[in-house]
Image (cartoon, rainbow, N blue to C red):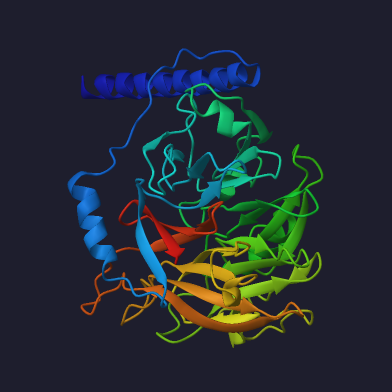
Amino acid sequence: MTRTIAASLAMLIGTTALAYGQQQSDNLERLSSFKTTGTTEFTEIEQGGAKAEAISRTLEKIKLPDGFQISLYAIVPDARHMAVGPQGVVTFVGTRKTKVWAVTDRDKDRVADEVKDFAPPLAMAIPNGPCFSPDGMLYIVEQNRVIVYPAAEFFYESPDVAASEVVKQGELIPVEEESYNHTARVCRVGPDGKLYISLGQPFNVPPPEKLELYRQYGIGGIIRINQDGTGREVYTYGVRNSVGHDFNPANGELWFTDNQVDGMGDDIPPGEINRQTEAGQNFGFPWYGGGSVRTEEYKGEEPPDDVIMPAVEMDAHAADLGMTFYTGQQFPAKYRGGIFSAQHGSWNRTTPIGARVMFTAVNEDGTAGETEVFAEGWLDENGEYLGRPVDVAQLRDGSIIVSDDLVGALYRISYE
């Protein structure tokens, strides 16, 4: 009797999963044909109230340079990487779960009025990485798929949105390489009009038998494709897990953060901000665990002779994630053309470090200048995280917003 019930239950679950998968496929096909799906409901997130007051109290503890202030911009559950719409209408916020949020400041008082889920008819799997093309095409990179949403700033008002697959489900990486680890993707559209996508590799340090496959697919690197999904190539090699990249607007060079090897001690290896000056460069992983520190697993092997060392060595295990070049005019001149980056905070360290926003100056010759702490205070004197910054994005007025996936919020930093 028990076996019969179990078999029936398994069959029911399997049938339900197949039906759900077919429904999702049908929904995507309908949306790509500009047809309705019948979905009418949004998930809306309440703004204000006791939670907003508690977050604002925490923000009173954040230290910033003179003249800067920080405030709560929006309550956004699991907020990860952000894409600000070219028209300044809406900001899309990815998560490591199943939703992307649309954040709107309708009255332009620099506080969001509305946060709701984007494209609710479509199930998403770790839609961490949204990014925009200059002409308003929103790309969302999931664990193993890329979807483009044309005119997202227009269609987001409805549950049904224009959408089509750029990279089909299961074709971004081999399905057998899907993992729960290092699977949060980020993307940018480069000055060449191509879509750049980071592909973290799933291991702390991968075994040798994986290296050829990973090099072929760009796992542990950054790939680029045409915006229609064609012309795939590996642009960047030797990366462990990059969860933030951007292009220097002054010369078009790609810069990216990289999270380095765990388990080597509190103070090594350093985190990285890297500068890439041409296609195909190798940044040293897995022979190097971070900076010039060799990994135990590959210390007996000769590293490639073309390894590029990091432009900036960051504190070990601070978990450098999202980054953006500052192109606004609101902040003082010293910040213009430099990099704001988020440190998520350590887990693999005796004394925690990170949970802050950093600033790295960029010199006129394109090299990195000094790096300094810009905003801190989310890690208190007891070693408790009061927030964990993930990404930094710039609003149209020249202020910046910082996402926090622990608190589930976006913060706005402005200057007067």
Pinpoint residue 135: horizontal percent, then vertical percent.
71, 40
Image position of 283 with respect to 193: above or below: below
Instruction: Mark yes or no: residue 285 visible.
Output: no
Q: Which residue of the protein is positioned furthest toward the front in this rendering?
A: 416
Instruction: Mark yes or no: residue 169 visible.
Output: yes
Quarter occupied by residue 300: bottom right
Residue in view at x 47 percent, y 33 percent:
118
Pinpoint residue 399: horizontal percent, then vertical percent.
50, 59
Pinpoint residue 328: horizontal percent, then vertical percent.
60, 61
Image position of 105 with respect to 285: above or below: above
Residue in view at x 25 percent, y 64 percent:
58
Q: Is residue 117 left or right of residue 363?
A: left
On-image quarter of the N terminus: top left
Pinpoint residue 230: horizontal percent, then vertical percent.
79, 40
Q: Is residue 367 left or right of residue 203?
A: right
Image position of 372 with respect to 326: above or below: below
In this rendering, the count of numbered labels is 0
Q: Which residue of the protein is positioned furthest toward the left in this rendering?
A: 50
Image position of 222 with respect to 303: above or below: above
On-image quarter of the C terminus: bottom left
Q: Nearer the viewer, residue 327 or 301?
A: 327
Residue in view at x 47 percent, y 30 percent:
123
Q: Is residue 410 left or right of residue 236?
A: left
